[in-house]
Image: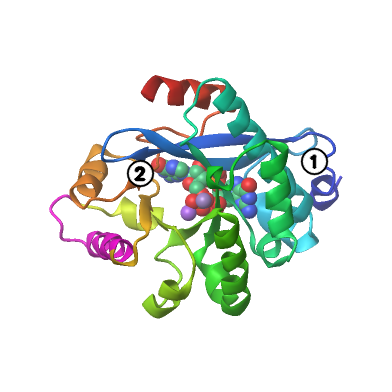
């Protein structure tokens, strides 16, 4: 069958799963959060990367039931981990696509997922890309305000790639900036690269706005040392851990905790 017709049935056929990538607090090494990342194992098409199927799911609207499943599954998993002894401080971050975010019922979907799993709103963070927020400034401000009132955190994903103005950022009720991997890739301990300057500036900006800052795609000890020196709050990347199946992630968190 065509990819799109398969995509429309992924939820009912149980072909989706989540993997989880830990985020480490640089000050003390704790795991404070995990990012939920979607995987699709299709019997017809094999394993398909989210980069390939999420844009298609956006175009055909299948992202709405898929996104709802992701929110429910992320909350169910976190609740199960808490029953297995994980700290109630740990939160789960879920990526939200443009179409999902622009639909006015996202607040209800999020509320329902939390309620079904008996989790407080503080257990959940929604990741929105900078470009989604920039392209829909008026709607974005209104939607984000609703999540702020609900107590659900908001992270700006892929930060630094979307040309946000400081004035605009300052007005948005957000909690976290995630520095795009593209900048982290170019970090040098010697300090003289464009990416080093950009990263240092983003960290300083986050601090002045009272936001948490997460570096994505951290792969080397040198990058980690640089981020520690700059007092970046959290790091995510293969150096700390790749995305893990739920059971493996639970063991990882309990080991570090
Ligand atoms: O997991 P991976 O590194 O392959 O993710 C590739 C891209 O897919 C990333 O941009 C990520 O934000 C996106 N992605 C992963 N899971 C989800 C999801 O559940 N929903 C949405 N909208 N995007 C996701
Ligand atoms: O766009 P977003 O930040 O949501 O996507 C995260 C993507 O980055 C996922 O596809 C995840 O698998 C990938 N990823 C996470 N850590 C690393 C890393 O250290 N190196 C690389 N190359 N990719 C990473
Ligand atoms: Mn993300
Ligand atoms: Na990103």
Secondary structure of the residue carrying tag 2 is: strand
Q: Residue at x 79, y 60 (%)?
A: 60
Q: Give above or below for 162 relative to 58.
A: below
Q: Is residue 141 left or right of residue 162?
A: right
Residue 194, given in percent of the width and then of the height, sits at: 24, 65
Closer to the camera in the image, 230 or 51: 230
Figure disc tally:
2
**Residue at left offset 51%, top offset 24%:** 250
- Main SS of the magenta part reads helix
Q: Residue at x 20, y 61 (%)?
A: 193
- Regarding residue 95, the answer to whether it shows in the image is yes
Left or right of 236, for residue 105: right
State yes or no: residue 213 in magenta.
no
| The CB of the residue at mark 2 lies under 8 Å from ligand 2 | no
Q: Name the residue that disc number 1 marks.
A: 11
**What residue would you read off at disc 2?**
235
* Magenta extent: 189-207
Does 87 sit above or below residue 67? above
In terms of sequence position, does the residue under pointer 1 or pointer 2 come before the other? 1
Quadrant housing the N terminus = top right
Label annotation for residue 79: none
Quarter occupied by the C terminus = top left
Judge from the rendering whether residue 119 lies leftward or rightward of residue 112; answer left or right. left
Above-or-below relation of 253 to 219: above
């Amino acid at each position: 069958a065509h990819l799109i017709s398969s995509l429309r049935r992924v939820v009912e056929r149980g072909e989706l799963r989540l993997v989880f990538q830990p985020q480490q607090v640089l000050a003390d090494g704790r795991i404070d959060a995990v990012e939920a990342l979607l995987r699709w194992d299709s019997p017809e098409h094999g394993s398909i990367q989210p980069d390939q199927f999420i844009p298609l799911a956006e175009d055909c609207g299948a992202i709405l039931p898929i996104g709802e499943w992701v929110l429910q599954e992320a909350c169910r998993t976190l609740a199960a981990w808490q029953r297995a002894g994980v700290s109630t401080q740990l939160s789960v971050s879920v990526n939200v696509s443009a179409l999902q975010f622009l639909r006015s019922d996202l607040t209800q979907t999020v509320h329902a997922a939390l309620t079904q799993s008996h989790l407080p709103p503080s257990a959940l963070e929604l990741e929105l890309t900078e470009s989604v927020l920039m392209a829909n400034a008026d709607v974005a401000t209104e939607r984000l305000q609703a999540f702020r009132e609900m107590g659900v955190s908001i992270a700006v994903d892929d930060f630094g790639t979307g040309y946000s103005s400081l004035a605009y950022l300052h007005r948005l009720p957000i909690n976290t900036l995630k520095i795009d991997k593209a900048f982290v890739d170019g970090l040098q301990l010697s300090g003289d690269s464009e990416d080093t300057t950009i990263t240092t500036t983003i960290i300083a900006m986050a601090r002045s706005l009272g936001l948490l800052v997460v570096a994505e795609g951290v792969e080397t000890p040198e990058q980690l040392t640089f981020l520690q020196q700059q007092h970046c709050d959290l790091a995510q990347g293969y150096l700390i851990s790749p995305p893990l199946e739920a059971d493996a992630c639970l063991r990882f968190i309990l080991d570090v905790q």
